[in-house]
Image (cartoon, rainbow, N blue to C red):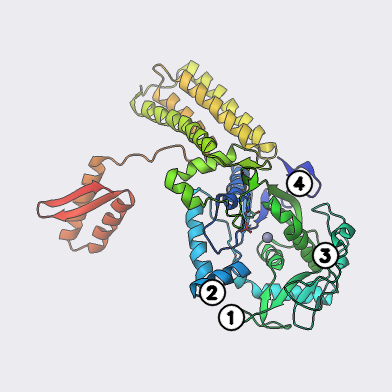
Amino acid sequence: MRIYNTLSRRQEEFKPIEEGKVSMYVCGPTVYNLIHIGNARPMIVFDTFRRYMTYRGYDVNYVSNFTDVDDKIIKKANEEGVSAEEISERYIKECKKDMEGLNVLPATTHPKATEEIDGMIEMIKSLIEKGHAYAAEDGTVYFKTRSFKDYGKLSHKNIDDLEGGHRDIKVNGAEGKEDYLDFVLWKPKKEGEPYWESPWCEGRPGWHIECSVMSKRYLGETIDIHAGGEDLIFPHHENEIAQSEAANGEPFAHYWMHNGFLNIDNKKMSKSLGNFFTVRDIAEKYDLQVLRFFMLNAHYRSPLNFSAELMEAAKAGLDRIKTAVSDLSFKKKNSDKRELSEEEAGMLKEAEGFKQRFNEAMDDDLNTADAISVIFELVKFANTSSKEGCSAAYAAGLKGLITELSGVLGLIVEEKEEILDSDIEALINERQEARKNKDFKRADEIRDELLSRGIVLKDTREGVKWERA
Ligand code: AMP
Ligand code: ZN
């Protein structure tokens, strides 16, 4: 697998630190609102990367944080007159719902910044001891940017160009910053803000230190891949590198992957510009699989313009795959149950070749757009070659291949098997039997199971009736 590494600005062959394993950290959202579809882009893209690596046999340790203490969260809490924790917990829950809808797998670990404060204090202490940080009089702790000689290596900026003659600028109104380039590791609380005790003042961490600490705790000092949207390259990721490498004396991440922006009218979609759609907005109109498919139709590093037309095209494309799969399901059920003919066996072997080409596309810096083209070709091959009187086994083979490759992209292309009326009747009878025997636990289990399959039971005078929810 080759991936484009922002650090070297080149495609590089991926070599994991430990054979067969991938350690990966993806910067997660700040939780003060429903996520917009721009935020969904890194979730979908890096989830797809993770799925592909898993598919190729790697054991992927995937960590993605929630930033749950931040000015915006505090502001929202004050507006609503509730605690910051209530806001962040609410939007973590909502974010997880959106992830589920987008078929983004839960991370191996989803750490929250507020639960990692001790580790942050430890890292800040060690940075001070090593001469990379200092506390100002008001208790703000700053990272001494010039003390880290590689500063700028990720964003390819020259430290002297950054200064721009603003030596005296203060940050957050705090006094005592020695150099314009220094950034905050810890800041004193303001009235009404959540805070933690620390050796410097009652306060809270800066944003960058969170990720350095959570990455180290769950993945170790040096990790394979660190990822996020390209807006994070500078200063967030540059600062993470400075903190982590200064504190640990080890390289922080071997590969840096960044997704391009999701735009509207060629402008970055963002909360602050107000030009956004939430994932929830899209879910009102489309199955979220369509949004996932739309995103994967572009290369992850390219900018991607969102538009109604492109969503419609994505819907049509995804439907084409789903229709092929549903036709093959029908054939699998209703065709001859004979063995594969020799010709069919040959054609299935030919179809396996699409898998090879799919992998080649994905190995080429996660070229999901090309991988989707391969799936379309496979669909075409399936539609033509299964047209007349194929065996059930042949239909099953093709269907398996299409669902397998779509599944690697996290696309669900198969309708859930319709639950048969006779199954429902059998379960209802079992429930009646259980109730007669006063086994109410089993009776309730059956009711819940049916409910989860979209069947609502109604106890009526004539007996139990059911309907689809
Ligand atoms: P935030 O909550 O703003 O820190 O963003 C969470 C993640 O979404 C980060 O990886 C950002 O880089 C990413 N992100 C935010 N806006 C966009 C956008 N319009 N397009 C692509 N990625 C974005
Ligand atoms: Zn981060």
Q: Residue at x 60, y 67 (%)?
A: 72
Instruction: Provide the secondary structure element on which disc 3 rests.
Output: loop
Residue ID for mark 1: 192
Q: In this view, does 239 lie to the left or right of 310?
A: right
Residue ID for mark 2: 78
- Front disc: 3 or 2: 2
**Residue at mark 4 to residue at mark 3: CA–CA distance:** 21 Å
- Mark 4 and mark 3 in contact? Answer it, CB < 8 Å: no
Ligand 1 within 8 Å, label 2 CB = no
* Residue 382 % position (x, y): 48, 23
Q: Which mark is residue 5?
A: 4
Front-lying residue, 240 or 346: 240
Q: Residue 249 carries which label?
A: 3
Circle 2 residues within 10 Å: few <14, some 14–19, many ≥20: some
**Residue at mark 2 to residue at mark 4: CA–CA distance:** 41 Å
Name the kind of residue labelled 3 in the image.
Gly
- Mark 2 and mark 1 in contact? Answer it, CB < 8 Å: yes
Name the kind of residue labelled 2 in the image.
Asn
Q: Residue 299 carries which label?
A: none
Judge whether 214 appears above or below 339 on screen.
below
